[in-house]
Amino acid sequence: MSKEIVHSLILIVTIALTFLYPKTSLAQYDLQFCAFLFIVLFLAKRFVPKKEASRLLESVIFTLIVLSIVNTTGATASPFFFLVYFLLFSLSLLLEPVISITASLALIIFFLINLPEGQNLKNLLPIFSLAFLTPFALFLGQEFLQIQKLKSENQKLEEKTLLFLSLVLKNHLKTIKEAVENFMGDSQLEAIKKAALKMEKLIDKFERKIS
C-alpha cells in the first residue's frame, strides 16, 4: 500500500477512537489524557529519529487531543470546534496534502453519525463547513511541498556550485598562477591563454546547466 493510504487508514482509526472516547468512563480524565499525549509527543520528538515517523506520530497525537477536547465539550456545539479547522491545515502540512480530504470526509461522517436527533441547520453548519475548508487545506499542503522541493533544489545547486568552484576553477587558477610565476616567454603565455579559455568554457557550460 502507498504511504498516503497507510496514513489515511491510521488517521481514520484515530478519528474513530476520539468519537468512542467520550462514551467511555475514561472521558472524565480528559485533561490527564491530553497531558499524557503531550508527554508522549515531547518524548517522541526527542527519541524518534525518523522524520516521517515523527510527523505521523505528531499528526495522530494532535488529532487525538483536538478531537477529544471537541467531543467531550459538546461536539459540534463545542466552543473549541474551531480547533478542528486548524487540525485539517496541520494534517495537510505534517503529512501529504491529500490527507486533508480523507480526514475531512471521516470527520463529516463521524460527526453526522453521532449527531443527536432533531438538530437544526445551525448545528449542521460546522460539520459542512469542513468540506469548504478542505480545498484550502489541500492547496496549502501542496504549496508547502512545492516550497520544500525548491529549497531542496537550491541546496543541491549550492553544493554543485561549491564543487565547481573548489575543484574545476581552483585547478585552472593554480595552472595560471604557476605559469605567471615561471613566465619565460610565449610558451607560458600560451598556457595561460589555454587555461583561461578552458575556464571560460567551463563557466559557460555550468551556467547553461543550472539555467
Image (spheres, rainbow, N blue to C red):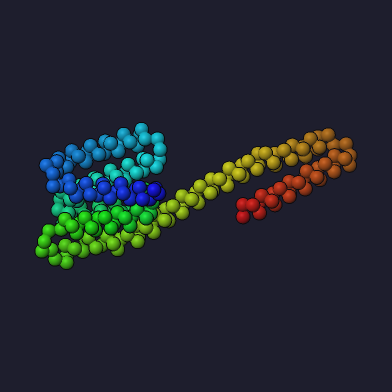
User: In the rendered view, does 189 fall on the left or right side of 147?
Assistant: right
User: In the rendered view, does 123 fall on the left or right side of 139?
Assistant: left
Residue 22 image point, x, y percent: 15, 47
Query: What residue is shown at x 11% (from left), y 61% (from top)?
Result: 117
- Toward the viewer: 159 or 119? 119
Query: What residue is shown at x 19% (from left), y 50% (from top)?
Result: 19
Asked whether the viewer can see residue 69, the reply is no
Query: What residue is shown at x 21% (from left), y 64% (from top)?
Result: 125
- Toward the viewer: 80 or 176? 80
Quadrant of the rendered image containing residue 89: bottom left
- Toward the viewer: 92 or 107? 107
Q: Seen from this angle, which residue lies furthest right?
A: 185
User: In the rendered view, does 196 fall on the left or right side of 56?
Assistant: right
Residue 62 image point, x, y percent: 28, 45
Q: Seen from this angle, which residue lies furthest front?
A: 1
Quadrant of the rendered image containing residue 31: top left
- Assign the C terminus to one quadrant of the image: bottom right
